[in-house]
Amino acid sequence: MTHGVGRRAVLLTNGPGELWGWVRPMAAELTGRGWEVALRILPCQFASGAEGRVASSLGLAEVSGAESALSTARAMIRPGLPRPDAVIQLGGDLMWGRMLAWSCRVPLFCYSYGGKRGMDRCAAVYTAFPAMVASIERTGATPVVVGDLTAELAAPPSRPPVTGGPKVAFFPGSRRGIREYAIPLIESTVAVLQELFPSLEARLVLSPFSEGEDMGELRASGLSHVSGGRAESLDGLDFAVTQPGTNTLELMHRSVPFLVAIPFSSLRHVPLPGVAGLAARLPLVGPLLREAALKAKGRRIGFTAWPNRLAGRAVVEEIAGEITPEDIALRVAEHLGDEARLAGIREALAQISASAPAGAAARIADHIEGVLST
C-alpha cells in the first residue's frame, strides 16, 4: 500500500550539509511513496549561496528561499495554499517549523543530531545514533533513533587498491571565502607530501555547492578534483584531510581514516551568529574579532569530528592552532606510514557507523505516516 498518495509535506532546511545530506534522501523517500514535497530554505549564516540552485535539481514540487528573516517569518505565518499534512524540519532553528506548523494546524516533525529548544513541542523527534539521545532528552523530548540520513546515499566501505601510490583527499569547504583560503593551504600541503611520497595521488573533493562558480583559484593550483557529495568521490582513498562538518560522517560511513585540521588563521572566514556576527562585520577589526571569538569557542567545545563526538574519544586525529602546511603533511605522513594504525581507525569507524540503524529515511516516513493515520 502506498500511504503517501495525496499527502503533502513541507521540508524546512538551512545549510549545505543538511540540504545535501538530509533533504535529498528524505525527499526521495517521500516522493517515492507518492507524497508531494515542497522545500523551504531557511536563513543560515553558514549558507554557501548556492542552496537554491542545488535544491532546484532535486525534482521537488516547489522550492522557495532562502530569504531574509523577516520575509521567512511572513512565509511561515501566511504560507498560503495548498495546506500541507506535515511539516518536517531538517536543520535550522525550530522557531520556523513551529510557526509554520501552527499557522497550518499540522504536526511538526524534526530530525536532529542534538537537542534544540522547542523539541518538546514536536509531534516526533528523530535522531541518528544512540549516542545523540541524551542531549535531546534534556529538552523534554523523547527521540526515535532512526539512523543517519547522511549514510543513505553512501556506498559500502571499500579498501584502497594495493597498487599505486597513497591516495589522499582534501576537502576545501562549501563557502567561497573558506575555499579561497583553503585551496592554497592544500596546495602547499600536497607539495610537502609529494616530497615524502613521490607517487602520491592527491584528490580535491569539491562541494556540490561550488559547482558552476568561477574556480580560477583551483585552475591555478593544478590540483586534480572531483565533485563531492557522491559515493564515487571517496572511492579507493587511503586517507583524507577535512574540516569539521558532515564530511566527517560521510568519511566515517565509508571507513576512510581522516584528519580534521583547523588552522586558527582560517577562523577569520567562519561566520558567527547573533551579536557576535554583527560585530564580526565591522571594518578592519571584524575579522580579528571573529577569529578571537571562534578561538575561545574552540577551546570549550572539545571534539569537532563526529566519530570522536559519538565515541567520546579520539578515534581520528584533530589538530587546531597556528598550524602550517608542513604540520598537516607530517600528520598525514605519520598515518600513511602506519598501516596497523589505519586498519584500527577503519575498524573503529565501521563500528560507530554500524551503531545506527539502516534505512533512516524509510523509518522516518513510516513513523510519520503512522502518526498521521492515527
Image (cartoon, rainbow, N blue to C red):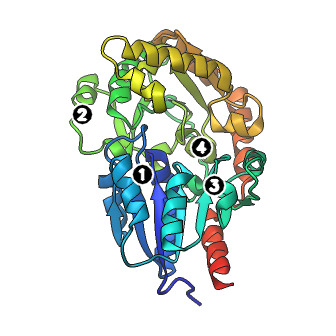
Mark pair 4, 1: CA separation: 23 Å
Dot 4 and dot 3 residues touching (CB under 8 Å): yes
Q: Which residue does the numbered mark 3 point to in the structure image?
A: 148
Q: Nearer the viewer, residue 70 or 139?
A: 70
Q: CA distance from mark 3 to mark 1?
A: 22 Å
Would you place residue 340 above or below residue 83 in this image?
A: above
Residue 263 image position (x, y, % from top left):
50, 16
Q: Secondary structure at mark 4?
A: helix
Q: Earlier in the sequence, mark 1 or mark 2?
A: 1
Please tell me which residue lies in front, 180 or 295.
295
The label on residue 42 is: 1
Q: Nearer the viewer, residue 255 or 60?
A: 60
Residue in the picture at 53% in, 82% down: 4
Question: Relative to 275, is 304 on the left or the right?
Answer: right
Quick one: label 4, few (<14), some, or many (20+) residues within 10 Å? Answer: many
The amino acid sitting under disc 3 is: Asp
Q: Nearer the viewer, mark 4 or mark 1?
A: 1
Instruction: Characterize the local packing of mark 2: few (<14), some (14-19) or many (20 or more) Cα atoms within 10 angstroms.
Output: few
Label 2: which secondary element: loop
Q: Circle 4 sits on which residue?
A: 249
Q: Earlier in the sequence, mark 3 or mark 1?
A: 1
* Residue sitting at x 65%, y 85%: 373
Alpha carbon distance from label 2 to label 4: 26 Å
Looking at the rendered structure, the kind of residue marked 1 is Leu
Residue at image coords 51%, 30%: 243
